[in-house]
Amino acid sequence: MENNNSSHDNYSLTGRTFNRIREAILLGQYETNEELKEVAIGKELGVSRTPVREALRQLELEGLVKIIPNKGAYVTGISSKDIQDIYVIRSLLEGLCAKWTAKLIKKEQISELEEIVYLSKFHSSKGNFEQVFELDNKFHEELYNACGSVILKHTLSEYHHYLERVRKITLSRKERVNASIDEHEAILNAIKSGDEALAEKLANMHMIHTIKNISDKGLENILSEKPDDSKI
């Protein structure tokens, strides 16, 4: 029994370490090609080198890290092309999600989405963009929960998380924030009316508008903006 518990604890520790390092990479807290030193990361996180090493191997499978034998692990990160590809793919999947949600959504989920839109407008008017960002997360998560597909929910949640850095920057700009909230409200109204085709179209266009906004601002310029957070 002790061995099983020890194995479970080690797995949980590796999982937590993996999530912390991945979060730092996705938020741009590490430079592309920067070396990820096991000892330094382990010291920062208060763990041994073993969970750090295992986490780096998992991150290599995700394409976020490259391990060079006898040299070390280096950040690959998310390229501008990766981000553009994810948004295009996500635009199609978000449309499908909204379509299914329009058919399956429950009253209490509609109420939750209405409250999110209301609070988003309030915090935007006050310039509370951190709260707007969190509410944006909640809006999409609620749609994913309501679409009736665990597979689609998991896929979209992963894409949503991968784009967190770009989303955080774009949603700190008032003109995009207000447009995004209006788009959320339009999607919600289509869902409430049970119009599956319109909900799909509006959710798809929501992502297309985001892509255009990013293109207008210059993706490389966005990616060059540095987060204020410490690395881990």
Image (spheres, rainbow, N blue to C red):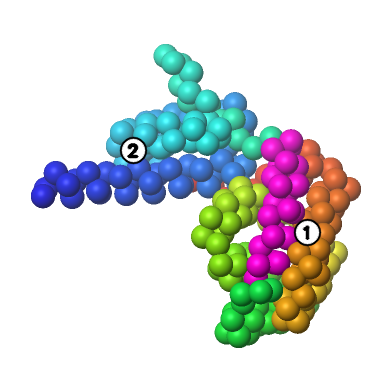
Query: How far across and down, in percent of the image, does residue 75 sit?
Result: 56, 30
Q: Is residue 83 magenta?
A: yes
Residue at point 57% right, 37% down?
30
Say which of 42 and 15 sits in front.
15
Q: Is residue 176 visible?
A: yes
Q: Is residue 207 magenta?
A: no
Distance CA(mark 2)–CA(mark 1): 40 Å
Q: Is residue 16 above or below residue 112?
A: above
Query: How far across and down, in percent of the image, does residue 38 sit?
Result: 39, 31
Query: How far across and down, in percent of the image, does residue 124 sit?
Result: 75, 73
Say which of 1 and 44 sits in front.
1
Give the left or right position of residue 179, taking residue 172 as reference.
Answer: right
Residue at point 38% right, 46% down?
15
Q: Is residue 189 above or below residue 200?
A: below
Name the residue carrying label 2: 51
Residue at point 55% right, 62% down?
149
Residue stretch rendered in magenta on the structure: 80-101
Q: Quadrant of residue 113?
A: bottom right
Query: How far across and down, in percent of the image, does residue 31 sit?
Result: 61, 33
Name the residue carrying label 1: 204
Main secondary structure found in the magenta portion? helix
